[in-house]
Image: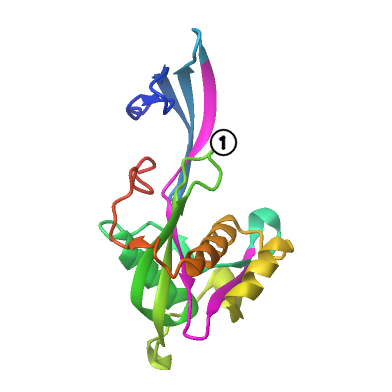
Amino acid sequence: MRDHEPDAEDGSGGHVYQVLSRTDRFSGPVFSVVSDEVTMPGGGAARRDYVRHVGAVAVVALDEAGRVVLIRQYRHPVGRQLWELPAGLIDVAGEELPATARRELVEEADLTAGRLDLLVDVHPSPGFSDETVRIFLARDLTPVPEQDRHHRHDEEAELQVRLVDLDEAVRMVLAGEITNGPAVTGLLAAACARQTGWAALRAATEPASRPPGGAAR
């Protein structure tokens, strides 16, 4: 049994969903699976099984020509290659999220960013996981020197990197060619933000209302 998180309201000042108990089903380095007994409106309680995840960041890296960086990587749960954004887990203790985003951009796309802004936060699958992904917009891109590039292994050894015009990337989303959740969200958000001259962007250091990865550690 593990101490549960603070009880949560439904967002309207109504019922408080009190966690009566928690049972650990599985624990791994990236996620754990738990069962909570939660009080329900009108009385009684219900069991809710879900995944507690360390959280992740993703990066929409946009160059001066209006092209975004897409990577193609094998994802075993779906059994195929997917087009995605540079992204990674929040798995380095004490590392701030902008630093995580910059590190993943270096490791997966061989790029550094002179400017980083907060684009959007997303819960990819809130019906069964508490995972939060913070998506950044990276600009003023510079290639990492060849001798300093990250050595990729496992699935990343075959990782493909492509520069695609943002409008083409949006077309790929709407055509079903890009289905990765954070990629869909980030690309559409970037296209919307561009229409307003990037006026809606937030500071990369803005704290999250509930820090990604905070519940799963």
Let me know if residue 26 is in the magenta part. no
Q: Which residues are magenta?
A: 46-74
> Which is nearer the eye, 17 or 48?
17
Q: Quadrant of residue 78?
A: bottom right
**Residue at the image point whose x is 71% and y is 65% from the top:** 177
Left or right of 25, for residue 117: left
From the image, which quarter does the N terminus lie in?
A: top left
Q: Nearer the viewer, residue 179 or 168?
A: 168
Please determine whether, in this image, residue 134 is positioned above or below residue 40. Answer: below
| In the rendered image, the vertical position of residue 2 relative to residue 137, given as above or below | above
Residue 52 as seen in the image, left or right of residue 128: left
Q: Is residue 161 visible?
A: no
- Where is residue 84, by image quadrant? bottom right
The number of numbered badges drawn on the structure is: 1
Position in image of residue 35 (x %, y %): 49, 27
Instruction: Name the side, left or right, on which 47 lies relative to 148.
Output: right
Q: Position of residue 50 (x, y in %)?
A: 52, 34
Q: Residue furthest left?
A: 94
Residue tagged 1: 127
Is residue 53 within the magenta segment? yes
Identify the residue shown where x is 51% and y is 40%. 129
Q: Looking at the image, is 82 positioned above or below residue 213?
A: below
Is residue 8 visible in the rendered structure shown here?
yes
